[in-house]
Image (cartoon, rainbow, N blue to C red):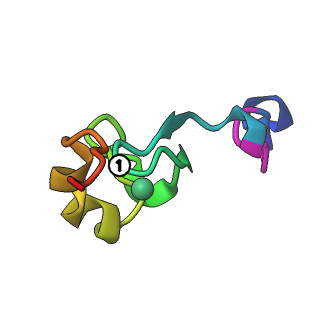
Amino acid sequence: MTPARTRDFAGNKAFLPRKPCAVCGRTMTWRKAWAKTWDEVRYCSERCRRNKGAAAVPVAAPDG
Ligand SMILES: [Zn+2]
């Protein structure tokens, strides 16, 4: 019973780390599933992970 120690994570979502998805730019909020790999997480979803190649190419207007 140490209430003082729970203040960091007691449902305080505003306290969680965030960073933008490398592909779509959507803000990703820290998840428990990413606790061990947060530094490596770069994509918000499997879909973006697969699209990472497309993101490396700047948006270009089609010829014609
Ligand atoms: Zn994304």
Would you say 32 lies left or right of 1 here? Answer: left
Q: How far across and down, in percent of the image, does residue 56 sit?
A: 19, 41
Q: Residue at x 31, y 46 (%)?
A: 41
Which residue occupies the foreground of this view, 18 or 22?
Answer: 22
Q: Give the image quarter of residue 58.
A: top left
Which residue type carries mark 1? Val
Q: How far across and down, in percent of the image, does residue 30 sit?
A: 53, 46
Q: Disc 1, ligand 1: is the CB inside 8 Å?
A: yes
Would you say 39 lies left or right of 50 here? Answer: right
Is residue 19 on the magenta stretch?
no
Q: Residue at x 26, y 47 (%)?
A: 55
Is residue 10 on the magenta stretch?
yes
Q: Is residue 47 above or below residue 44?
A: below
Q: Which residues are magenta?
A: 8-13
| Rendering quadrant holding ligand 1 | bottom left
The majority secondary structure of the magenta stretch comes to: loop
Which residue is most to the top? 4
Image quadrant occupied by the C terminus: bottom left
For label 1, the crowd category at 10 Å Cα-Cα, with few meaning under 14, some 14 to 19 and many 20 or more, is many
Q: How far across and down, in percent of the image, does residue 48 sit?
A: 32, 61
Where disc 1 sits, the SS reads loop
Residue 29 visible in rendering:
no
Which residue is most to the left? 53
Residue 61 visible in rendering:
yes
Residue wearing tag 1: 23
Q: Is residue 54 above or below residue 5?
A: below
Q: How far across and down, in percent of the image, does residue 59 sit?
A: 31, 44
Q: Residue at x 24, y 61 (%)?
A: 51
Q: Residue at x 35, y 49 (%)?
A: 23
Image quadrant occupied by the N terminus: top right
